[in-house]
Amino acid sequence: MEKQSARLEALSDGIFGVAITLLAIEIGIKGYDGANNVNLWEKILERWPEYFSYFNSFATVLLIWMGHNKIFKQLRSANHWIILINGLVLLLVVLFPYPTKTVGTFIGTNAENTAVAFYAAFTGSISVSMLILNLYVLKNKRLLIDQEKSVPWIKGMIKGQVIGIASYTIITGLAFYFSKIAIVLTFLMWVFWAIAMKDKNDEFYG
């Protein structure tokens, strides 16, 4: 079972790497007639929404990976249900470039509200999948290497995920009325996750 857990972690790391790569694959400017130094700078600058959405999503995926990595470092073994729940997490993570591209394309257009709402809702769905994973691990403590160290951290993560999911729900609703405020709040959410995942026993997870 330990070997199975290690293989599952390696597979997950690979998929996270693919997701991060896919976030940037659409960024770029195709060749065009009449290109010169001035109008090229203009085209570079006018694509700022894509750069913003990439940075925002990169930070989010990185933090999701950090939390995912910490969970699996604490597992002695992975059973059938952990593999399936982890598959749900990876499914959503690898699809994250889709809402990222959508919000980067439609910021500043008449479809901005829907694009931002979709982005916030999708990000929240990843948090839901991570919450399900943590809840299952907490329910099956025998799978943990050290329950004394792991359980308090998992409980803290569950609390943070509930707050995060509630926040994404609010941001999604807000996006239909105040899209620019909502997109800024999605940016601030990964700052929240960076703080929420900090643990005094980080050396245990290294």
Image: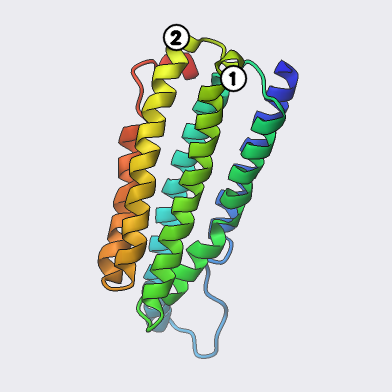
**Residue 97, disc:** none
Look at 38% across and 62% down and name the residue there: 52
What amino acid type is highlighted by mark number 2? Answer: Glu
* Direction from residue 197 to residue 184 in the image, left or right: left
What amino acid type is highlighted by mark number 1? Answer: Leu
Residue 23 visible (yes or no)? yes
Give 119 or 105, whichever is nearer the viewer. Answer: 119
Q: Are marks 1 and 2 in contact (CB under 8 Å)?
A: no
The picture places residue 74, in percent across and down from the top left corner, at: 54, 19
- Occupied quadrant, residue 11: top right
Quarter of the image with the N terminus in it: top right
Q: Residues within 10 Å of mark 2 (few under 14, many from 20)?
A: few
The picture places residue 45, in percent across and down from the top left corner, at: 36, 73
Look at 44% across and 40% down and name the residue there: 63
Residue at mark 2: 148
The structure's colour scheme is rainbow
Q: Where 205 falls versus 166 (above or below)? A: above
Q: Residues within 10 Å of mark 1 (few under 14, many from 20)?
A: many
Residue at mark 1: 75
Q: CA distance from mark 1 to mark 2?
A: 13 Å
Residue 10 visible (yes or no)? no
Q: Secondary structure at mark 2?
A: helix
* Direction from residue 94 to residue 198 in the image, left or right: left
Name the N-terminal-most of marks 1 and 2. Answer: 1
Q: Where 47 falls versus 124 (above or below)? A: below
- How many numbered discs sit on the rendered protein? 2
Look at 35% across and 78% down and name the residue there: 108
Q: Secondary structure at mark 1?
A: loop
Look at 57% across and 77% down and name the residue there: 30
Residue at the bottom extreme? 34
